[in-house]
Image (cartoon, helix red, strand yellow):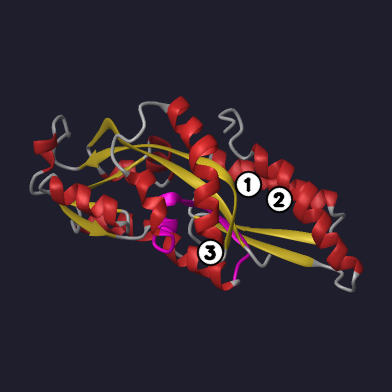
Amino acid sequence: MNRDHPFRYAILLLPLGAVAFLLLLGGAGKSRYTIKFGTVAPPDTPWAIQLNDIKERVERESKGKIRFKLYLGGQLGGEIEMVQQVRRGRIQGGGFSTGAIADIVPELSILELPYLFRDEAEADRILDEIAFEPLSEKLAEKGFYLAYWGENGWRSFGTKTRPIRKPEDLAGMKMRVQENPVHIEMYKALGATGIPLPVVEVIGALQTGLVDGFDNTPLFSVASEWIYKVKYYTLTRHIYQPAAIIFNKRF
């Protein structure tokens, strides 16, 4: 995984692979083709910038025959909802956390275990050299094509009432949790109540008191503005969470 440019693989993959394939379709009578790509990545983040690079290159190298329509910030719904849309062919692809894709491909949940990886280098080696092939096969069985891993990052706790300096500090808290069994069980083991919510509902839940906090990566917490609704953000780095760029296999 190239950390300087985590979407580099797609920038190379799409123009050389998908563009060539889709141009053949165009030569067969279809003058234009639209790729709909969804993500909860907020605008003006590195993820969005890199996806826009892909969009521009695909459209440029296809000479306008392919339109790459990018839906940022959960415009098409929550992550699980968009993963289902990819599977059904309503959109062609997307960039999602592995925790969300695990709703359909539960084997991905192994990557969500707390403190599974010691550092980024170990995560990269395991994801690229060990996990990619078997998990690609599991995704293919459910109708997906795994293009490559992306970078989501290390999750930490954002809380309204107190910092999380030790596990016991979470006891009794209501925490927004990703809609994934591993995340839900983690909070249960720590004595907190995990409340599953899609990304687009978290701000409202923090404002109304439905939840006392959340866990997510520093970049996403700032870009989504969740961090401005809590008083404390404790760098626990308790889960390293990859992202995955997936497409409908028929595409």
Asked whether the viewer can see residue 165, the reply is yes
Segment tinted magenta in the rendering: 90-105
Residue at numbered disc 2: 55
Which is in the foreground here, disc 3 or disc 2? 3
Regarding mark 2 in the picture, which secondary structure is present there? helix
The percent coordinates of residue 100 (x first, y second) are 41, 56
- Residue type of the residue flagged with mark 1: Leu
Q: In this view, does 56 lie to the left or right of 73?
A: right
The percent coordinates of residue 44 (x first, y second) are 55, 43
172 vs 203, nearest the viewer: 172
Which quadrant of the view contains residue 49?
Answer: top right
Residue at 82 percent across and 67 percent down: it is: 32
For the residues bearing labels 2 and 1, Cβ distance under 8 angstroms: yes
Mark 3–mark 2 distance (CA, rounded to whole Å): 28 Å
The percent coordinates of residue 105 (x first, y second) are 43, 60
- Residue type of the residue flagged with mark 2: Lys
Which is in the foreground here, disc 3 or disc 1? 3
Count neighbours of disc 1 (C-alpha within 10 A) and say few if under 14, some if 14 to 19, many if 20 or more.
many
- Mark 3 and mark 1 lie on one chain; the one further toward the N terminus is 1
Residue at numbered disc 1: 51
Residue at 36 percent across and 32 percent down: it is: 117
Residue at numbered disc 3: 141
For the residues bearing labels 3 and 1, Cβ distance under 8 angstroms: no
In the image, residue 14 sits, relative to residue 8, either above or below, namely below
Q: Is residue 104 magenta?
A: yes
Residue at 40 percent across and 54 percent down: it is: 107
106 vs 245, nearest the viewer: 106
The percent coordinates of residue 186 (x first, y second) are 21, 47
Count neighbours of disc 2 (C-alpha within 10 A) and say few if under 14, some if 14 to 19, many if 20 or more.
many
Regarding mark 1 in the picture, which secondary structure is present there? helix
